[in-house]
Amino acid sequence: MSEQEQQLKELAVYKYGFRDEDAEYEFVVPKGLSKEVVEAISHYKNEPEWMRKTRLQALEIFFRKPIPTWGVDLSELNFDEITYYASPTSRKVRSWDEVPEYIKRTYERLGIPEAERKFLAGVGAQYDCLTADTVVFANPGAVPIAQIQPGQHVYSLDVENRKIIKQRVKAVVYKGELPVFEVKVAGRRIKATFNHPFLALIYHKEDGKQRGRFKVEWRYLSDLKVGDYIAIVKRLPDEGKPYKLPEVEMETEFIGRNQFGTFKVRTDKFFRRTQKDLRIPEQTNEPFMWFLGAYLGDGGLRRKKKGAPKNIVDIALPASDRACRERLAKVLWEVFGYKLNSDREPSRVRIHCTPIARLLSAIGLDKNAHTKSVPSWVFGLPQSQKLAFIAGYIDANGHVRGDEKNSDVMLTSVNETLLRDIQRLAITCGLQVSDIHSFRYKVNRKGRSDERIGYRLLITGDLSPLVPYSVKVAANYKPRKYHHRDESHHHVKLDAYMTDEIGFARIESIRYIGVEPTYDIEVEGVHNFIAEGIVVHNSEVVYHRIREDLERQGVIFVDMDTAVREYPDIVKEYFGTVIPPTDNKFAALNTAVWSGGSFIYVPKGVHVEMPLQAYFRINAQNIGQFERTLIIAEEGSFVHYVEGCTAPIYSTHSLHSAVVELIAKPGATIRYTTLQNWSYNVYNLVTKRGVAYEDAKIVWVDANIGSKATMKYPAVYMVGKGARGEVLSVAFASNGQHQDTGAKMIHAAPYTTSVITSKSISIFGGRATYRGMVKVYPGCKGAKVNVRCDALLLDEISRTDTYPVMEIDEEQVEVAHEATVSKIGEEQLFYLQSRGLTDDQAVKMIVNGFFRDFAKELPMEYAVEFTRLIELQLEGSVG
Amino acid sequence: MTEALEIRNLRVAVDGREILKGINLVVPKGEIHALMGPNGSGKSTLAQTLLGHPRYEVLEGEVIWKGRNILELSPDERAKLGLFLAFQYPVEIPGVVLGNFLHIAYQAVKGTEIPIGKFNRMLMQKLRLLDMDASFISRGLNEGFSGGERKRCEILQMALLEPEFAVMDETDSGLDIDGVRIVASAVNKLYEQSGNQMGFLIITHYSRILNHIQPLHKVHVMMDGRIVLSGGPELANELEEKGYDWLEEQLKAEGVLA
């Protein structure tokens, strides 16, 4: 081979993608296209007769149709040199070692962790999860993980900005009974499997260097040891709201008795003299929460005699606690308009008030010392009310120790769960807590001595937030001179890593507990959440676990070959109805030789929470060059499908021609996201079209980065009143590439809306073309059309063109069209460079800015991938 | 000799037309100089040339800073040598988040990496110093900024990048009295913080900003691409009162200007 040929060959190899030269195939049809080839494909797939016929008809149409002469240059495309079907080995593998080398390499290049690789390859299960009783800090409330619902919000850490934010839960998954370990850190305890990741602060020191540096990274529990720093939450953002209290019947009938017999008395009359101001507040406030805390700390509901209703509220405040009793009287008056006058008993205060007693049982607090717990809504209150609640608890049942240097609060109880709740609540308010310790004590009863177990919790550190609320803390509070904080380690200051909300603390112990039921949740965006006051990672593998959930909802998500076999009725009803083989030459080709692709059916009203991804089936090995995708969303349903460039390029073929058909029934929404990154030798000729019925919505989000030539114009046919179509398309055309992309919007009903946003960048002689078609049929009054295309030229040798076509046959429409072509400004480059950025950095920054609005539309991991790909494309040749 | 920014016989053309016709100017470190002059006299050309805008063609001369002729360096290398230009018309760069940009610029100029958390804390300090709102940093770079906001953003960058020599190109124009006072007090603070070591070349039309700057060492007047007059701070007020015409006539009479 001459040197020049060698160079040419290298040019054709895509720099950042990869191919699997040594993939094994068990069935390959001969090159070229003929009736025999199509028959062979259908036969090999064991397809029903109707599909075989459809294929053969499409083949004839393909031969008849002329090759398009517009768009990209197809003169080098030779249909006879292409292999139209090859089936890789479908043998199931049992262990990681049996997984073919090329698939392992693929995972390697994709940067998928080994555990997940095993899962993907079907040889291992992954289980990073927490025990069912783990309490997740949700918004609002604090909820055991097993009770979290998809769609609910939980607190997560924005790792980059070290801020606590609210994120939506995408899924909750039961992971089965698994061995778990208990981790103790800063008074907190959590039970997790060995491979659950925690956010750790790890000290790295290079040999020969005196000092190392800390790095924040995710570490599996199995890679952590006692003494390592992991991230804890010091407080939650104060964004709670008062809780609306249930309404309580104020009146009660009494049966009275006198010398004339029995009669009925209503309390409103009864109270007219003594408690005429009595009222029940509509929502919680600080004094009410203090009262509730005191009640929970050492109170209960009593009845006057057997059989009578529980209408007495008892709080065991001894008379010696003068100040606390005074506070109680004041609070009762302020909150309920209740005058406390039974202040005679030495050991307790009795409140004879049916409405207050009713309120307490209505909010679930009619329980005894062993069973009572903090209602979940208390966690959703404003911080001041939570502090008031803790203060009430302390005043009724706590002991505040204080001397010159130190003050802390000791709470003891026989109820460990209750103390845990108080502890979690204290954490959310930014108080420092100890772990909960148990102790034994003796009880003498009827001459017999019993040993019991009690629990103790300390609230330590800075108690000043409690001072305004707690009588006892205020009386004993001494500002501490020194608070222990983990401020430095190996002479490196840690405060750079800490904020008011997030800190790092040393693991005190890790201990094996046993086998327990476990769960995991998946959180949108940041992929972590806060459980038991500790920052933990969530499982992205949930993506791959969703199949069972989908089945429960009646959603079908399978590859197209399977769909033809298992759901022939649905497939037959819709296949080729949106894009018939007669549509264009490549649609005909695809219909004749299609293989692979996805089939999705979403039943009426079902909202599929997380994006369904083609990447899901990475090892299904039938991702073809001619995949066929069909998505049917029944009335009022929602689905988001993502096909990503992270799928390896299995084939050595040079033609990719897919067909995608979407059907959005009335009120349904389909979102379809593509990140195209084919190698530089591939012709990418794709037909994508959706039909949107009444009030339905179809959104195409389409990024084209790779390929030699792409022709792709996602279309929406709006056939029902109020339907909506959106296309958001970006293209990156580099050396030798032609990205001919755009959109097609057909308004065939009134009050339909279409939005096209196209952004392209041309560089190193690349060519980007926007080709758009908007048609509004007569009678579509009230239609709205909005088209915007921005092109950015990064050098003089590149090219960009715009071919917008608008056929508007109705007068009552709103049309907006805007197109800009800008060269990367000398002024912009100079501005960034004058701030120290190199030419290279400046171009990257401008390009990323240009695509930023688009990247925001992608699921996070795809946005990261997109940005990385764009940067790779820009690299090297700039400057 | 003390360190200085020294411009020697600088001749610069734009699109073939000579704008700067032999500038000679020395601004020692630790001094604040003002450059005044009528419109079109070449003040902005000088500012842009000092940082290396590619549109300005240097015909002759050199600019010596830290012992090197910086005209041979790229703009980013000049920035890394401690030079800074506050632009008269800062451009909009859509989609580039100001906070990210500042982080990258800071690391580029300082040549060190700094974790984002630590950086943000520092940034907040600077924002407080300039009495600016924190929401500023999550916006696009100059995207949809008002004229005043753009100028403040320039000052923020200057405060953050801590240059050793700053050229300020009409930063005061288009600002109201309060805006001018904020800019002037920022200059004073930065000068003070540098231990009176920073150098400034403040290009302006008006003396009002100069009245707030302490200390102002020298005022230069530029006309038709040359420095025609240099003097003490009092010169600024004199020009404000009498205008440039008076000076121009006098110089023509003396044969300095054609």
Image: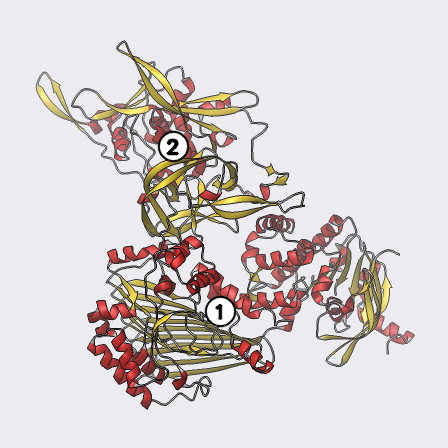
Q: Nearer the viewer, residue A360 or B73?
A: B73
Q: Do labels 2 and 1 share a chain?
A: yes
The residue indicated by pointer 1 is: A17
Amino acid of disc 2? Arg
Which SS class for mark 2?
A: helix
**Image quadrant containing the C terminus of chain B:** bottom right
Q: Residue A487's mark?
A: none
- Residue A822 position in % (x across, y down): 56, 76
Q: Which of B124 and A539 is in front in this view?
A: A539
Asked if residue A284 can be seen in this view, the reply is no
Q: How crowded is mark 2: few (under 14 residues within 10 Å), some or many (20 or more)?
A: many
Outermost residue, top direction?
A447
Who's the residue at 47% across and 41% down the image?
A: A233
User: Which colour assignment does the render follow?
Assistant: secondary structure
**Is A405 displayed left or right of B61 in the figure?**
left
Marks 2 and 1, the one that precedes in the sequence: 1
**Image quadrant containing the N terminus of chain B:** bottom right
**Is B235 displayed left or right of A378 in the figure?**
right
The residue indicated by pointer 2 is: A420
Who's the residue at 38% across and 23% down the image?
A: A397
**Is A617 displayed left or right of A5 in the figure?**
left
Front of the two marks 2 and 1: 1
Res A393 quadrant in image: top left
Q: Which of A582 and A42 is in front in this view?
A: A42
Does residue A859 lie above or below A284 as drawn?
A: below
Res B38 quadrant in image: bottom right
Res A106 quadrant in image: bottom left
Who's the residue at 30% across and 26% down the image?
A: A370
> Label 1 lies in what chain?
A
